[in-house]
Image (cartoon, rainbow, N blue to C red):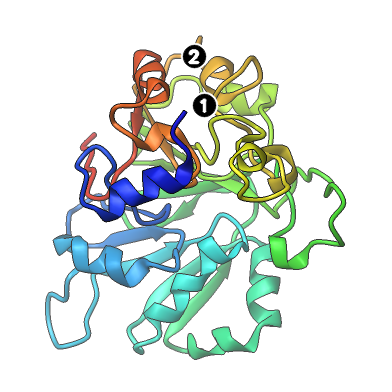
Amino acid sequence: MELPFARLRRARAGDTAARPRTQASIVVSGDGQRWHLFNASPDLRRQLELTSALHPTHGRRSTPIASVVLTGGDVDVIAGLLTLREREPFALHATTAVHAILTANPIFDVLADGIVDRHTVMLGQPIALDDTLTATLFAVPGKVPLYMEDGDRMQPILVDDTTVGAEISDGTHRVLFIPGCAAMTDDLRARIDGADLLFFDATLWDDDEMIHAGLGAKTGRRMGHMSMAGAGGSIASLADLTIGRRIALHINNSNPVLLDDSPERTEAEAAKWIIAEDGLRFTL
C-alpha cells in the first residue's frame, strides 16, 4: 500500500503519474468572452495564470471574469475572493447563509461596494449570468464550515442554503457542479439524472482513509463528504444514472485516485469517471 506521503514525494519529484492539482474551481462561458467562476479557491491566482482565457484582455488589470458563484462558506470556496480585490467589477452570487459569512468577516470588505455587486440567490430560482447562461442553486447535504463548528463532535448534516450545488444551463444542456456533498438523497439523484456534465465531490476514496494514513482523526462523514468507494459511495450511488460525463473533483491528497497507476484510478475510470486535473476543458 502506498501512503499519501509517498504520493506527495512522487508529485514533488515531477512524476507524471502523480501530477499535482490546484483546488476545486471551474469557469464557464457561453460566448468565450465573459466567464463565470464557480468558487474562488485559495490558489485562484495560480489558476488564473494557468488559464489563458482568464488573462487580461484590455488594460493592465482587466479580467474576463464577469461573475463569481459560491456554493458554500468553507475556506477553499471563499479565500480566493481576496485575489479579486483589484477594483475590477464583477457580480458575486451566493445564498443568504454564505453572504452572512462574508459580511461577518470584514477582510472581505476589500471587495468594495460599487465595484463588486453582491447578489443574494434563493434556492431553486434561476439567475441570469448573462444572456446565454443561467445558474440555479439547490440544497446539498452538508455542514457548517470547519471554522464555524461547535467543538469536535459530529456536526449535524444540514440540507439548506449552507451547502449548495449549482446547475448551469444554456437552455439546452445541463452542467451540475457539486464540489461538496455529505450524503446522497433521492432528490439529488433525480436532479443529477440526465445531466450532460457532472462535477462531483471526490474528497476521499474511503471514509476512514485519513485515519489509516495518520493524517487526522476525522472520517469523511465527519468532514461532511461522502466517499467515492463502497456501497454508499458516489460511484455506486450514481452508477445507474444517465450522465453524459462525470468528473471527480475536490480530491484530497490522501485519495489514491489521484495516481494514474493506482488500482483506485483503474476502478474509477472503469465506472466512467474522469479524474479532474488542471486545464480540463469541455464543450457542450
Extreme-top residue of the structure? 240
Residue 141: % across, % down: 70, 40
Vertical position of residue 259 compared to residue 44: above or below:
above
Query: Residue, x 47% and y 43% (percent of image)?
Result: 4
Q: Is residue 40 above or below residue 179?
A: below
**155 with respect to 187 (left or right):** right
Q: Is residue 187 left or right of residue 270?
A: right
Corner quadrant of residue 190: top right
The location of residue 184, given as percent across then percent down, is 66, 27
User: Mark 1 to mark 2: distance in Å?
Assistant: 8 Å
Disc 2 on helix, strand or loop? loop
Q: Is residue 60 visible in the rendered structure shown here?
A: yes
In the image, what residue occupies the spot 67% across and 50% down?
A: 216
Which is nearer the eye, 255 or 190? 255
Q: Relative to 166, is 12 above or below? A: below
Q: Is residue 251 visible?
A: no
- Disc 1 is placed on an element classified as helix
Give the residue pinned by disc 1: 192
Ranked by sequence position, the earlier of labels 1 and 2 is 1
Image location of residue 202, percent across then percent down: 50, 37
Which quadrant of the view contains residue 41? bottom left
Q: Are marks 1 and 2 in contact (CB under 8 Å)?
A: yes
Residue at 60 percent across and 36 percent down: it is 209
Residue pointed to by mark 2: 241
Q: Amino acid at mark 2?
A: Leu
